[in-house]
Image (cartoon, coloured by chain):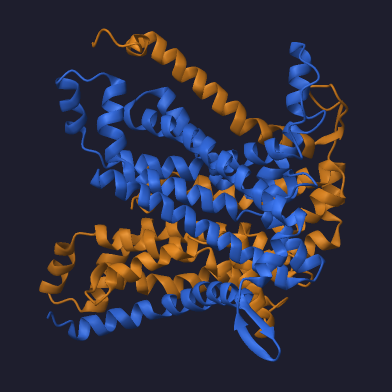
Chain colours: A blue, B orange
Amino acid sequence: MKSFGREGAAGILLVLPPLLLLALLILYPAAEAVLGTLRVERAGHVIYSLDRYRDMLQTVSLRRSVGFTLMVTVISAGATFLLAYPLALYLRFTRGWVSSALMALFIVPLFIPVVIASFAMVTFLENHGYVETLLHYVGIEGLPPLMFNAVGIVLTEVWASIPFATLVLLAGLQAIDDSLIDSARDVGAGPLRTFVSVILPLNTVATIISLSFLFIGILGSFTIPYLVGGNAPQMMSVVMTNYFTNYLRPEISVALAAISFVIAALAGAAYVMGVARRETA
Amino acid sequence: MTGGSVFWFLSVGAFRRGLAILFLVGLAVFILGPLLSLVLWAFAGQWFYPALLPQEFSLKWWTVVFGNRGVMESIKYSLMTAPTVTALSIIICLPAAYAFARFEFPGRRLLLLSFLSANSFPKIGLYISIATLFYRMNLMTTFWGVVLIQLVGTLLFMIWIPTGTFRGINRSLEEAARDVGASGLRTFLQITLPIAMPGLLVATLFAFLAAFDEAQGTLIVGSPNFITMPVMMYTLVLNYPQPVGAVFSILLTLPSLVLLLLAQRLLRQGYLAAGYAL
């Protein structure tokens, strides 16, 4: 057994404050939210049951909201990933002015507050917005609505998530040794083959982290669906906030919060298991 | 080059270049288009479809925004909370980051990873859970409630980026200073801290922006007493004419843009990317 001594004690003392904060502000409230919704009082006794969830999911609007949230979240996360991966590949393997321009460009949304991004998207995509104006001059009319519906939410979520996804994937790609790629080329692998059998497997960790954080980030986003989404169906985050602040039914919003934690945990677990299976196969 | 592949055209230089430029243009329209349209709205006196530019430019909406009492209050609250959150985050997180990078103690790696949990919960669900706790602690609609909820979003940056920075400093420099008789504190202040400064600045910058731009949690915990600028933006977008929201957007983006320009050099040197390497 290694002795840690004074240095170890000092280390623990220094990391204690942020850990306490983490426990108080994140772990405790989250655990309490999940446990609290399972606690039901029956005939003077406190018991644990799923009754509250059953009641809640029998409400049609809430059930629709959960389904809508899952659909929008999966599509947004997938679209961002499919856009960010080629971008990260290009930035990693190509030098030149196009690469520098892309580098300066993709980072921009990171510095724009989400509230503003949502509003900018509204002015861009709304009925008679800038996109419609531009298309009018090219002679295209009668576009389906791009704003205040799922399309608007997805486009805005992608806009806001590009920097994060690209940065994570790029950091992963930069950790891959050039010599591995060169040797794949040397034995005659084309660009596609090199990508599928060398780069993709070596970048698994970044792929999982970007996908799961995209999913969780979008699942928990409120501003974008609130400002850019329609009236019905609404995403869970909007419903949750409405029940909390407007309808004064915090117990429903906490139960929805707990459901979102469970969905996030399941998504995380699915990714981890998927990878574990591929590693052992 | 390799022959026989269906994707043979991908290896033709001109084609690849053309494709890349097309991608660049598409991405530029997608990312910059909404922002340009927003800026135009901020200076529009009159703008009716289908004109490409406003029929009349005007600054009248700027006076409307600056004349709004709620707006001025929100600027005051934002200037109170964001710096407080940043300062608290520095005091709480930087010593911990140094310990994570330099000291050996049991569970170090696991504890460092535990900070990922700050970003592993769907945010709005977490804020609602925190708010129910704050009700019991009488922190709802208070200054410190807002500060604490904004602190949540700074934890991961302020631990991970500085830990990476401290870890990247060559220990032999510190040892050399100790060898010529410098005390531990002096070595830290004169050797370690100056070398770490750029990384620490990037982390601080991101913590400040995270706090300054936080809207969702502040809306739940702070309103109606503490309406900060991003929360005010909800009201302006939903209840005022479009140019008012556009003007306020520019005001709200200014701090980010100024800080971005100031930090350009640091960002280019890869301190930001370092924070995303896992």
User: Residue B97's spot in the image, x, y percent?
Assistant: 35, 69
Between residue A92 and residue B188, name the one nearer to us: A92
Q: How many marks?
A: 0
Q: Quadrant of residue A207?
A: top left
Q: Is residue B79 visible?
A: no
On screen, residue B155 above or below B143 = above
Q: Horizontally, is A276 left or right of B74 in the view?
A: left
User: Residue B236's spot in the image, x, y percent?
Assistant: 81, 52
Residue at (72% x, 47% y) in the render: B249
Q: Is residue B126 visible?
A: yes
User: Residue B198's spot in the image, x, y percent?
Assistant: 37, 56
Q: Horizontally, is B243 left or right of A217 in the view?
A: right
Residue lying furthest bottom in this view?
Answer: A44
Residue at (34% x, 71% y) in the render: B111
Between residue A250 and residue B89, name the one nearer to us: A250
Q: Horizontally, is A211 left or right of A221 in the view?
A: left
Between residue B205 and residue A209, name the one nearer to us: A209
User: Residue A12's spot in the image, x, y percent?
Assistant: 31, 81
On screen, residue B10 above or below A160 = above
- Which quadrant does the N terminus of chain B fall into? top left
Q: Horizontally, is A171 left or right of A74 in the view?
A: left
On screen, residue A164 above or below B3 = below
Residue at (68% x, 84% y) in the render: A41
